[in-house]
Structure formats: structure tokens, C-alpha cells
Image: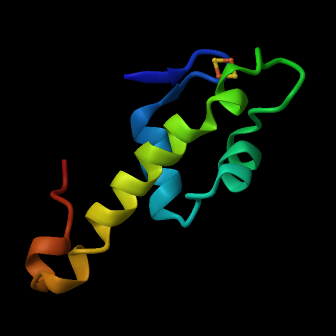
Amino acid sequence: MYVCLCKGLTESDVQQAAVNGNVCPDTLKACFGLEDEDCCGRCAKNIHELVAIAHSARSLTSTLPLLPQHHRQRPAY
Ligand code: FES
């Protein structure tokens, strides 16, 4: 699902950014350029929505080290 039409960002993009450590408002804005001139400003103003998505992804992946190694690997497509 798209979460930012100006940048064409999907929920999955935000989740991946979170896995890479971007879960704070300022880092998410910088990571995706949400304050660039070509943005409408909606996402920067409502950054809490992207932060919530990022925190959900981050808390989900933080449980992965508890799983055996064969459960952590992504399937090859
Ligand atoms: S919809 Fe995300 S900045 Fe415009």
C-alpha cells in the first residue's frame, strides 16, 4: 500500500527503512526526502504515521534473533 504519493513510497519501503535503523521522525524524513520541494508536506506533517509503521516493523524484526538460523533466512524466489 502506498503511504506517500509524492515519493511513491510503500509501507514496505518504510518497513525496510526501519530494519535499517530509521525509526525516528527526523531520520525517516531525511531518508525519504519528505521535506523536498517536490513534496506536498503531508507526510512530514503526519510523520507519526510512518513512525508507527517503522516501529511495528522494528519490533517484529527484533524477535528474529530468537529464532533458529533456518527460520531467519528469507526464501529464495
Ligand atoms: S504524499 Fe508524502 S510528501 Fe506528499
If the picture is divided into quarters, which one holds ligand 1?
Answer: top right
In the displayed structure, would residue 8 be above or below residue 57? Answer: above
Residue at horizontal 65 percent and vertical 48 percent from the top? 28
- Percent x, y of residue 42: 68, 20
Residue at horizontal 78 percent and vertical 19 percent from the top? 39
Determine whether, in the image, residue 62 is placed left or right of residue 33: left
- Percent x, y of residue 36: 85, 29
Determine whether, in the image, residue 19 is placed left or right of residue 60: right
> Total number of numbered labels?
0
Residue at the right extreme of this rendering: 37
In the displayed structure, would residue 22 be above or below residue 70? Answer: above
Q: Quadrant of residue 71?
A: bottom left
Determine whether, in the image, residue 41 is placed left or right of residue 11: right
* Front one among 66 and 76: 66
In the displayed structure, would residue 51 be above or below residue 34? Answer: below
* Front one among 2 and 24: 24
* Front one among 70 and 17: 17
